[in-house]
Image: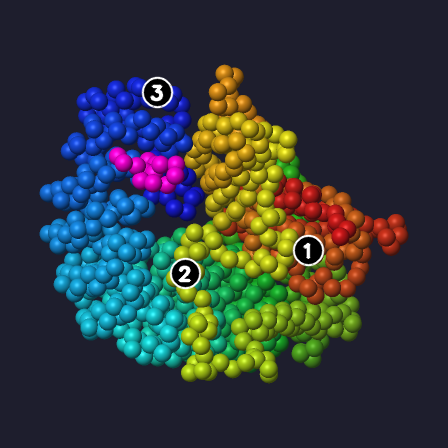
Amino acid sequence: MTAAENVCYTLINVPMDSEPPSEISLKNDLKGDVKLKTEALKKVIIMILNGEKLPGLLMTIIRFVLPLQDHTIKKLLLVFWEIVPKTTPDGRLLQEMILVCDAYRKDLQHPNEFIRGSTLRFLCKLKEAELLEPLMPAIRACLEHRHSYVRRNAVLAIYTIYRNFEHLIPDAPELIHDFLVNEKDASCKRNAFMMLIHADQDRALDYLSTCIDQVQTFGDILQLVIVELIYKVCHANPSERARFIRCIYNLLQSSSPAVKYEAAGTLVTLSSAPTAIKAAAQCYIDLIIKESDNNVKLIVLDRLIELKEHPSHERVLQDLVMDILRVLSTPDLEVRKKTLQLALDLVSSRNVEELVIVLKKEVIKTNNVTEHEDTDKYRQLLVRTLHSCSVRFPDMAANVIPVLMEFLSDNNEAAAADVLEFVREAIQRFDNLRPLIVEKMLEVFHAIKSVKIYRGALWILGEYCSTKEDIQSVMTEVRRSLGEIPIVESEIKKEAGELKPEEEVSVGPAQKLVTEMGTYATQSALSSSRPAKKEEDRPPLRGFLLDGDFFVAASLATTLTKIALRYVSLVQEKKKQNSFIAEAMLLMATILHLGKSSLPKKPITDDDVDRISLCLKVLSECSPLMNDIFNKECRQSLSHMLSAKLEEEKLSQKKESEKRNVTVQPDDPISFMQLTAKNEMSSKEDQFQLSLLAAMGNTQRKEAADPLASKLNKVTQLTGFSDPVYAEAYVHVNQYDIVLDVLVVNQTSDTLQNCTLELATLGDLKLVEKPSPLTLAPHDFANIKANVKVASTENGIIFGNIVYDVSGAASDRNCVVLSDIHIDIMDYIQPASCTDAEFRQMWAEFEWENKVTVNTNIIDLNEYLQHILKSTNMKCLTPEKALSGYCGFMAANLYARSIFGEDALANVSIEKPIHLGPEAPVTGHIRIRAKSQGMALSLGDKINLSQKKTSL
């Protein structure tokens, strides 16, 4: 039996290379000593599992093996009697089975509790009423046995016999009810109660009613079954809720985490009262905090998030935001991420102040922790959460900004960039906070370590310093950061003692950079090799320039131009105006001089020279037009960008809330509980049944709506119709498992023996077990199941053949080669989203790239993009506004994540060749990047296969 089959009690590993022994040699071995008998019995079991009948051995085993008291033999015999055919071809019980029945009656009275218990377990698997009938008194007697192992299995045996053959023990529910009342062992009580739930629910309820106040004292395994019973009863008959809800409340205080979890889940389905929801949510939060396993924390957090999705429950959870934040004490980043997202979704004007206080404390805590990769990421998360709080509740911004501004000087550039983005948005939106932000920015300006953050800070200061004093402060900070000027002369003086007469000038290696659009830019640099010197005393801006980073100089030139033009409009004295402008121009000129000298590690680029020269020209002329461009239109551009971003966020929030709000149509029927028929009451699906189906991979998808998505679409023909053996496979993909259900049909008039399905895999697939051989009668058919495990997102191929022997023929084994089964990568890829910064970072990090040339018959750019999104399961990260309109070309970023946590990025760059006429197809490239080669290649193959639109 294979592991994929529904009913399977015993799994036995079969060594495939051994030769099957003959019946005579087996008979002789079964008459030998205990060791030989054990080995022979194992071989017999394997042969019967492979389809051999071996009727001649039955009496030998009864005579020579059955009377033995050896425990290993007894265990093997239980397996043997489970699988051996017990009836004649016409369906009557074999005469020999009477002797077997008598042997088992003796085993049920055996003094050893293990033998009794394992015999009772075996009886659960018997499907012959004639065999069970003589054993009934002995089974009943086992309920009185001193050992709990025997009593526990006796209950199970009685339950299965009652379910299959009620006439053999019609009083089973009454018998088990009496047993339950007097029983003390927890596992026996659990089994007995479980039987009553399924066999006679009323008796189970009667028993529960008598001991409902003692439920808290029961063992956790019994408590779990009680929760299941209450759920089922209340699900089938909602009027019973009031009777049992108190019991569920009590079970929330259970010492077992599993019971608490199940009780909370049941309470939510039974009652939507705010007190019930609050109690369940509180229970979930306690579980998350107390459980050490991160997987458990994530599962329970998901349950809390599900609760939040219900509009009426959301208000209750809002009061528990502070409790939810206690989960942040967990060091795992994924748990913290989900917790912060949940808290942010639940935050309201009532509790935002408390939330911000907690988050500020957490931010300060991360400062004192020893540097760790997750600490940086956690700090980023906190900054983003505080950012979102301040945007939604502007009153909070004043409290948050001073704390966050400290992080501009942080070593972690990503966290500082998030703070900078937040500060930029806050200074533009909240006019009243501008003086505070500028003041704090000037305080931390000299401590900024990253050139990217430095550029952003310069821009903010240049854009928003509006008073004479602030402008002077900015100039002072810039001079302080630049050090002594002129830079070239001061640097040469500093090095006068160290410089060699002849400098060696060498060409540095070409450096490949990735731009924001994902294209490549190549830089090479002339550098002077000179002795390394101490740079601790070098001011930050001077350090950036000497390292060859002149982009910051272009940014500085723009800032100086803005503040100089603003200073001119604020100060009336001509002398002061000219002095300030001259100082700004001197700074720009000295930077240009430095760029052209051989002092920096890399020379200044032409773009930066042009920019600084332009700023010098603007300051020399001071025209009103330039004043407008520098001081008004820059800010308008930022304002437009922020308002577009805000609009997009509002739109996505609106879509989310529309999804959650349950709309009731005017003509929808109203259901009154008192007037509803009993079978209509269970409007919700049974959660226990659903979770069982999900675990078995039998989740019911709505396939009827689309006939192409039905099961028949996944059937693959493996052999031809004229082959002696016809085979076809249904490929069922269930996350990490693939189950192949292969139908094998014998199309010949011969009996095919040892018919074996031999499979092999290509790619990251692994065959779990080899299917067992079968014997196929003429024109007979059989289903063979095979399990394949999937380890990564990669196009996999399953190939193989069917080998068989023809009964009575002397020829070699026959072989039918099967067609390949291709496993589609799309079953594992799901659309996902990430920020632009994360996308760029991954794009730079991922080493595997696959460039696919567009070759399609689609003539519209947008239609082509939608077609690619549909066929690859990817999500377009480029906003719809950026893609709207028509300009003859389009660039978009796509992102998806596999169920194995692998990321896939794609950049679509397409155009419409207008010179070839309106009917010309789209041209361009799609570049795919992934961490693994398999993912990049598989996705490229998928795009290549599905580029062209098929005409319906």
Q: Real-space Cα distance between discs 2 and 3?
A: 48 Å
Q: Real-space Cα distance between discs 1 and 2?
A: 43 Å
- How far from the left and from the top, in percent, is residue 599? 62, 45
Q: Residue 308: in sight, yes or no? A: no
Residue 256 location, quadrant = bottom left
Question: Disc 2 marks which residue?
Answer: 689
* Whether residue 372 is situated above or below residue 748 in the rendered picture: below
Which segment did they paint magenta?
Answer: 84-96
Question: Disc 1 marks which residue?
Answer: 892
Q: Main secondary structure of the magenta part?
A: loop
First along the sequence among labels 1 and 3 = 3
Residue shown at 73% from the left, 66% from the top: 619
- How far from the left and from the top, in percent, is residue 364? 39, 65
Residue shown at 48% from the left, 56% from the top: 699
Q: Secondary structure at mark 3?
A: loop
- How far from the left and from the top, in percent, is residue 552? 62, 56
Q: Secondary structure at mark 2?
A: helix
Looking at the image, residue 130 sits to the left or right of residue 375; the answer is left
Q: Amino acid at mark 3?
A: Ser
Label 1 with label 3: CB-CB less than 8 Å: no
Label 2 with label 3: CB-CB less than 8 Å: no
